[in-house]
Amino acid sequence: MSINPEIAKRRTFAIVSHPDAGKTTITEKFLWYGKVIREAGHVRAKSNRSYTVSDWMKIEQERGISVSSSVLNFPFEGCQFNLVDTPGHQDFCEDTYRALTAVDAALVLIDSVNGVEKQTIKLMEVCRMRHTPIITFINKMDLDGRPVLDLLDQIEEILKIKVAPFTLPIGVGKLFKGVYSISENTFHTFDKEEGRQEILKMTGPGDPRLVEMCGENWVSQFKEEYDVVTGGMDPFDHERFLKGEMCPVFFGSAVNNFGVRQLLNAFASLAPAPMPRETDKRIVSPGETDFTGFVFKIQANMDPKHRDRTAFIRICSGEFERGDKVYHCRSGREIRLAAPTAFLAKDKEVIDRAWAGDIVGINDPGLFHIGDTLTKGEKMNFTGIPDFAPEFFARVTLLNPLKSKQMNKGLAELSEEGATQLYQPVKSAVPVIGVVGELQFDVLQFRLKSEYGADVSLDRIPSFGVRWIVGKQDELEKFVSEYGMDCMQDKDERFVCLFPNEYRLNLAVKNFPDLKFEKTSV
């Protein structure tokens, strides 16, 4: 099946990393190369600096962290990039996991000082499970980091993926001289003081000009690393890369805009165009003429003045035109997608057309759920979009009783985004929220106050584990009458029990053998 040239030039990828590895900085540099921003923002904004484009929430700007995935579209070298910038902090992992279902490749960013870190390991497990092609960038080479071969060994041993270095650094820290491109035999010079960069053609790693520019000691160390990489490691295999078994590795310094262009060039030439997607009925090819897509994220109040809700849709096949009617598989309804938008974080513009690989935003009147499938009429559901059981719980107490309407609206809308889950206790009028990461409590409290004017206190509930109770109605009623103080209903009115300890859970399982105690709502 021939693929439309518009689809063939799409590159949809996510950046995954541990916090502080430089993810927001490299995102800004990508946008600068794509000519969609004039000046890259500063990560921790000062009064005279612009905020980073990707961190658009007020709480993100104040704390200098990403707490929500944002979508950024930009052109580069004949390709159209759709970049999903994900939170690095582990307390927002469920947002990152869902974002990884919407992309065709991922950039793994590693801090040369700290090496492979815990959160990166978790995210790589998701990439490996989905066979997502990976390109790795080892950042902060202008700092005194770990030895190059140690970093490469770490990637292979801890992340369990074969490495194929495309560049190698010469020097490190304050004496970082630049990177040598193995495939092109070129040397990319680095001069932090003057900010000047040159690309010089070399005859090979033994070119005498390298010693003149970098010094004999650094070149000697580089040659040893070059011999190990070219002689002892598997050569790059594009097929293995596409299966997620091998990753190209680049070195550089994002904050100094060094090595970033080479990285973008690699994504343009190596990363796949939109890939086929699995549904519960069949595999959908991007080249099919009929439109299909799925909702992987919902975001409330991107424009607080208008109290909007946006559903982010990954287009999986075909072409989509503004005003098209599509079939909403979960509800069985035909709906019109009136004003699809492309994004630069919270800034969006209405577009007339989009293709497979693109991520578009649709105004959501409350119809969409995460995981919803949209088609031209075919009944099917895209698979592999995860749902997460909360690990931490709190009662929500309103501090100003006159704001109950605002609080209820805020809780309902923010829980639709998927990061927090809202429950109504059976024997109490005080709502309960559940989150995967504790920092989500702070975000919820902050957003309820800033976006809805509802000031609340959150009182933590000690819990061993949450279980969805499934079974016949009469058994459910018996269970709820006995465990009513621990029972709640979720947004779909299913019974959930929040067990305070392991003993109480085991006792319930023993006393109600005809009921199922499920760990997730699916």
Image (tube, grey):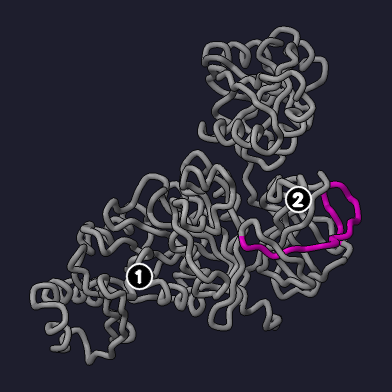
Q: Earlier in the sequence, mark 2 or mark 1?
A: 1
Q: Position of residue 296 (x, y in %)?
A: 67, 52
Instruction: Answer with the quarter of the image where residue 410 lies.
Output: top right
| 341, 262: nearer the viewer | 341
Instruction: Answer with the quarter of the image where residue 514 lies.
Output: top right
Q: Quarter of the image for the C terminus: give it.
A: top right
Disc 2 and disc 1 in contact, CB within 8 angstroms? no
Amino acid type of the residue tagged 1 in the rendering: Phe
Q: Residue at x 57, y 36 (%)?
A: 443
Tell me the distance, in whole angstroms, between the alpha carbons under discs 2 and 1: 37 Å
Compared with residue 154, is residue 482 higher up or lower down, i.e. above or below? above
Residue bearing the label numbered 1 = 250
Amino acid type of the residue tagged 2 in the rendering: Asp
Q: Is residue 117 visible?
A: yes
Compared with residue 315, is residue 513 higher up or lower down, i.e. above or below? above
Left or right: 70 as drawn, with respect to 262: right
**Which region of the structure is painted magenta?**
326-344
Compared with residue 365, is residue 9 higher up or lower down, i.e. above or below? below
| 109, 28: nearer the viewer | 28
**Element at label 1:** strand
Q: Residues within 10 Å of mark 1 (few under 14, many from 20)?
A: many
| 36, 462: nearer the viewer | 36
Q: Quarter of the image for the N terminus: give it.
A: bottom right
Left or right: 384 as drawn, with respect to 272: right
Instruction: Check if residue 482 falls in the magenta segment.
Output: no
Instruction: Check if residue 340 falls in the magenta segment.
Output: yes
**Element at label 2:** loop
Left or right: 408 as drawn, with respect to 96: right
Residue bearing the label numbered 2 = 372
